[in-house]
Image: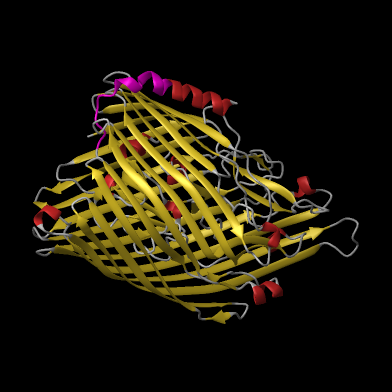
């Protein structure tokens, strides 16, 4: 009922102002493609979150921003969401699988796919969510789409920002970013960003008497240095470190926000990144070299029984799991990018050619221990302890290209393709060892037509792919070792029809896409528990289902009502289906997991005076299945957020609140037995953040 009231008042507010249209909307530029272009020219579904939106968000993390993008969902088993789903496609867990991803995650042209938890958003210029397969643009890490984060570049003039945020639940954050040219040489520019985000978290551990066992303690460091060697040659250097020290005391037996764990776990990640980009302009093209290195240390640990000796009494039930992960990547890409086409000057075509190499090395050490005792069993209690070390490495070699050809001044034909060779090596302390490889290909064909200067319609066919991989840590289950160790590549073919339009003298931007996607050898995540009394035997397995379909509609609308009001409306409709799954015929015809049929975001920005402004947004999702292993679903929900800003000279004061009506909603669900002595299968849900409020102060200099 509250959701309907919120939407009613928002639509009423819009209708009272719609006749006041007078201002133009700022041009929206896409930066995550081969070359920058107006969103009006795009032949795919893209949502762009610009710097105004990013700066206005008090919580500087992409997880919070993801609610603003329909048909984008995330799975948060622990503290931060690492894995995202676009149009219902994407991983939901990274505990026990190969490090590949169906949703690409790129920050400043460095591939962090599968590591979305590090996506802090302080001093970020723009975030783009490209929905649909990116087979020619990215390859195997972007079967479902791409999340592209662009941080702020060094500027030609010195400038900077500083910001401090204070809120309930122990929230205290501070950051500073500044940069410009070096005094000794105007061709050398830099930008430095440093921020610390802290919160006690939204859980209270009743057993330990603590309120910070799910805290967020996150540090962001970034240094950019640009050297303009000549008018033709530019070198960009990036050094970054993201350090997340986040305990993971999240799950509860009763579904409340009060935990009972006696051994809370961790969800920490420290990633160092280094990137260098070289570009040199020739007469009719530009050569680009992109090199990057990342080094990551992760701890994923948790109290597997979610309780303590008192809560389990008279049974002895105490289990703990710890995974220590190191991951190193190296990437090298060379591109030759032609100048943009200009039909009037006789340049009918623009093109891209390139090769890339991507190397991953990952080591996992998994340690489990536990004990179970039933007072009626004279032979108990029973203790268990296990340890597994696994080594995984892979190499991806790619050859890619794209051609845009203007048939006429207003009609463009585009074709792109990528050929990829994937080779992997795996061995572990259980004696498993193998060296699989795959050869995959994907691409895109599209036809775009500008009916006038403000309307572009397009049709496209795109094919994406995701390499096969391994299910790790299956040593406890011999059947799983034999039958579920390896899964095959998945392929996705998407057919899209869309339009991009500016209307009312560029006061309204509308983009809309209808899509139909076929999934072949669909990779699905299922779970199994070998021993019902031991939660450490709860394993995630990825298997191939034969087919799946994903159909939907995506609509984005941005309108500048007048010099005081602007609004945005984003809607995603999605219908998914699992088809022809021989090993699970009971799930055939059912919707895929983490694929809500409806998702939306509405927002209003009101410039009250030359100093004060008010922003309100409402985001929501309909119910969705938690897993392909069971038929339990979430509840639909809507979240309302607001921010009131007051500016004096270079100072901006923001009073904000998220989830104003304290909606109780869920982002993840497991169905298994975790309560002695019967261990009956039960639905356990991880709930989202409750209402929280705060004040932010920002100074621009």
| Horizontal side, residue 185 vs residue 630: left or right | left
Q: Is residue 593 above or below residue 421?
A: above
| Horizontal side, residue 495 vs residue 290: left or right | right
Q: Nearer the viewer, residue 490 or 186?
A: 490
Where residue 631 appears, as percent x and y from the top left, is 68, 51
Where residue 612 appears, as percent x and y from the top left, is 32, 21
Q: Is residue 451 above or below residue 243?
A: above
Q: Which residues are magenta?
A: 13-26
Q: Nearer the viewer, residue 384 or 21?
A: 21
Residue shown at 60%/79% (left/top)?
A: 432
Quadrant of the rendered image containing residue 159? top left
Quadrant of the rendered image containing residue 172? top left
| Horizontal side, residue 93 vs residue 450: left or right | right
On-image quarter of the C terminus: top left
Q: Nearer the viewer, residue 548 or 328?
A: 548
Residue shown at 35%/69% (left/top)?
A: 418
Q: Is 19 contained in the magenta span? A: yes
- Colour treatment of the image: secondary structure
On-image quarter of the N terminus: top right
Residue shown at 14%/48% (left/top)?
A: 181
Q: Is residue 284 above or below residue 450?
A: below
Where residue 584 appears, as percent x and y from the top left, is 68, 63
Q: Is residue 621 above or below residue 534?
A: above
Residue 443 appears in the figure: yes
């Amino acid at each position: 009922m509250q959701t309907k009231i919120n939407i009613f008042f928002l639509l009423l507010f819009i209708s009272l102002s719609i006749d006041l249209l007078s201002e133009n909307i700022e041009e929206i530029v896409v930066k995550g493609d081969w070359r920058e272009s107006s969103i009006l020219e795009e032949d795919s579904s893209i949502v762009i979150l610009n710097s105004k939106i990013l700066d206005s968000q008090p919580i500087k993390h992409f997880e919070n921003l993801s609610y603003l993008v329909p048909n984008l969902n995330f799975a948060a088993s622990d503290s931060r969401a690492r894995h995202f789903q676009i149009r219902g496609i994407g991983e939901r867990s990274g505990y026990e699988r190969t490090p590949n991803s169906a949703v690409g995650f790129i920050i400043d042209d460095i591939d962090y796919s599968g590591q979305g938890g590090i996506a802090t958003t302080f001093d970020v210029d723009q975030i783009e969510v490209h929905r649909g397969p990116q087979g020619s643009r990215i390859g195997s890490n972007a079967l479902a789409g791409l999340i592209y984060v662009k941080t702020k570049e060094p500027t030609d003039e010195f400038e900077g920002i500083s910001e401090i945020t204070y809120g309930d639940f122990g929230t205290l954050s501070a950051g500073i970013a500044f940069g410009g040219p070096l005094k000794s040489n105007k061709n050398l520019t830099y930008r430095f960003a440093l921020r610390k985000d802290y919160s006690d978290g939204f859980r209270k551990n009743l057993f330990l008497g603590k309120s910070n066992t799910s805290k967020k303690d996150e540090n962001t460091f970034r240094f950019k240095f640009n050297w303009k060697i000549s008018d033709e040659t530019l070198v960009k250097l990036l050094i970054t470190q993201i350090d997340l020290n986040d305990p993971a005391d999240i799950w509860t037996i009763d579904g409340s926000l009060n935990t009972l764990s006696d051994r809370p776990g961790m969800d920490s990640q420290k990633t160092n990144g280094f990137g260098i980009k070289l570009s040199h302009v020739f007469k009719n093209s530009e050569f680009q070299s992109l090199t990057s290195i990342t080094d990551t240390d992760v701890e994923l640990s948790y109290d597997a029984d979610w309780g303590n000796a008192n809560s389990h009494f008279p049974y002895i039930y105490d289990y703990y799991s710890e995974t220590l992960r190191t991951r190193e990547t190296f990437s090298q890409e060379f591109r030759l990018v032609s100048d943009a086409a200009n039909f009037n000057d006789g340049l009918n075509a623009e093109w891209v050619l390139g090769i890339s190499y991507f190397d991953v090395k990952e080591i996992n050490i998994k340690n489990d221990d536990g004990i179970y005792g039933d007072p009626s069993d004279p032979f108990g209690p029973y203790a268990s302890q296990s340890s597994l070390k696994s080594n995984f490495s892979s190499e991806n070699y790619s050859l890619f290209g794209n051609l845009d050809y203007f048939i006429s001044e207003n009609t463009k034909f585009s074709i792109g393709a990528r050929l990829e060779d994937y080779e992997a090596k795996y061995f572990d302390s259980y004696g498993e060892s193998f060296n699989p490889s795959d050869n995959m290909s994907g691409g895109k064909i599209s036809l775009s037509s500008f009916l006038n200067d403000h309307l572009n319609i397009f049709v496209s066919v795109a094919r994406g792919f995701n390499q096969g991989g391994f299910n790790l840590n299956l040593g406890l289950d011999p059947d799983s070792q034999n039958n579920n160790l390896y899964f095959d590549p998945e392929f996705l073919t998407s057919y899209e029809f869309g339009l991009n339009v500016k209307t009312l003298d560029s006061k309204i931007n509308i983009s809309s896409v209808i899509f139909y996607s076929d999934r072949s050898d669909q990779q699905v995540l299922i779970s199994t528990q070998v021993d019902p009394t031991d939660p450490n035997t709860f394993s995630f397995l990825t298997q191939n289902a034969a087919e799946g379909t994903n159909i939907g509609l995506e609509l984005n609308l941005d309108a500048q009502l007048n010099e005081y009001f602007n609004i945005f409306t984003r809607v995603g409709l999605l219908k998914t289906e699992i088809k022809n799954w021989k090993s699970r015929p009971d799930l055939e015809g059912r919707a895929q997991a983490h694929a809500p049929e409806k998702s939306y975001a509405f927002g209003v920005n009101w410039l009250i005076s030359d100093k004060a402004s008010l922003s309100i947004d409402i985001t929501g999702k309909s119910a969705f299945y938690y897993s392909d292993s069971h038929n339990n679903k979430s509840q639909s929900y809507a979240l309302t957020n607001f921010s009131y800003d007051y500016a004096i000279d270079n100072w901006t004061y923001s009073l904000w609140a998220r989830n104003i009506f304290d909606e109780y909603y869920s982002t993840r669900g497991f169905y298994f037995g975790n309560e002695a002595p019967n261990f009956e299968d039960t639905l356990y849900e991880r709930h989202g953040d409750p209402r929280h409020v705060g004040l932010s102060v920002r100074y621009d200099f």
